[in-house]
Amino acid sequence: MNKHCGEIVEKTIRRNGCSISELARLMKVNRRSIYNWFNQPKLKEDVIFKIGCALAHDFSSEFPKLFSKEDFQEAFLYNGKLKNSNRLVEEQEKVNYWKDKYIALLEEYNQILSINSTGKFDTMVFST
């Protein structure tokens, strides 16, 4: 009896608790593609591999003829390093955004203080 690859992948995704929308975003495909894959009895090896990488799931037990444990371990190691570096970049961007916002507000506040101390407060135009 042949395995229905789409059904196996669907069960794994649902067991994993990952939403279809999140998986589609991680894989850079639309949701419809994922639902279409669920209906296909045969899936390309690279599609299953990409789904496994996105879910951090080792499909070598479900598809031993297609994958070995080492295939996914190498991918997880590489993706783990990549995800950590992406998280660091995202966190740094967030920090820089708020730091720049704080500096801009501080400069505007200092400008208001200097204008207020010279008595020109009435003619000040505030920027937003």
Image (tube, rainbow, N blue to C red):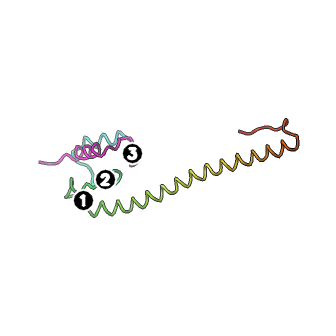
Please report the residue visible at 21 percent of the width from the left and 45 percent of the height from the top. Answer: 41
Q: Which residue is mark 1?
A: 67
Q: Is residue 103 above or below residue 121?
A: below
Tell whether 53 sits left or right of 92.
Answer: left
Label 3 vs label 2, nearer the camera: 2
Q: What number is the disc on residue 29?
A: 3
Q: Amino acid at mark 2?
A: Gly
Residue 37: in magenta span? no
Provide the secondary structure element on which disc 2 rests.
Answer: helix
Tell whether 69 sits left or right of 114.
Answer: left
Q: Position of residue 82 (x, y in %)?
A: 43, 59
Q: Which residue is mark 2?
A: 52
Please report the residue visible at 72 percent of the width from the left and 48 percent of the height from the top. Answer: 106
Label 3 vs label 1, nearer the camera: 1
User: Residues under labels 1 and 2: Cα distance?
Assistant: 11 Å
Give, as a single range, the part of the protein colored magenta. 1-30
Q: Is residue 128 above or below residue 48?
A: above
Q: Position of residue 110 (x, y in %)?
A: 77, 47
Please report the residue visible at 70 percent of the width from the left and 39 percent of the height from the top. Answer: 128
User: Residues under labels 3 and 2: Cα distance?
Assistant: 15 Å
User: Residues under labels 3 and 1: Cα distance?
Assistant: 23 Å
Provide the secondary structure element on which disc 1 rests.
Answer: loop
Residue at the top extreme?
A: 122
Mark 1 touches mark 2? (CB < 8 Å)? yes
Q: Amino acid at mark 3?
A: Val
Pointer 1: residues within 10 angstroms few (<14), some, or many (20+)? some
Q: Amino acid at mark 1?
A: Phe
Mark 3 touches mark 2? (CB < 8 Å)? no
Q: Position of residue 121 (x, y in %)?
A: 84, 38
Disc on the earlier residue, 1 or 2: 2
Pointer 2: residues within 10 angstroms few (<14), some, or many (20+)? many
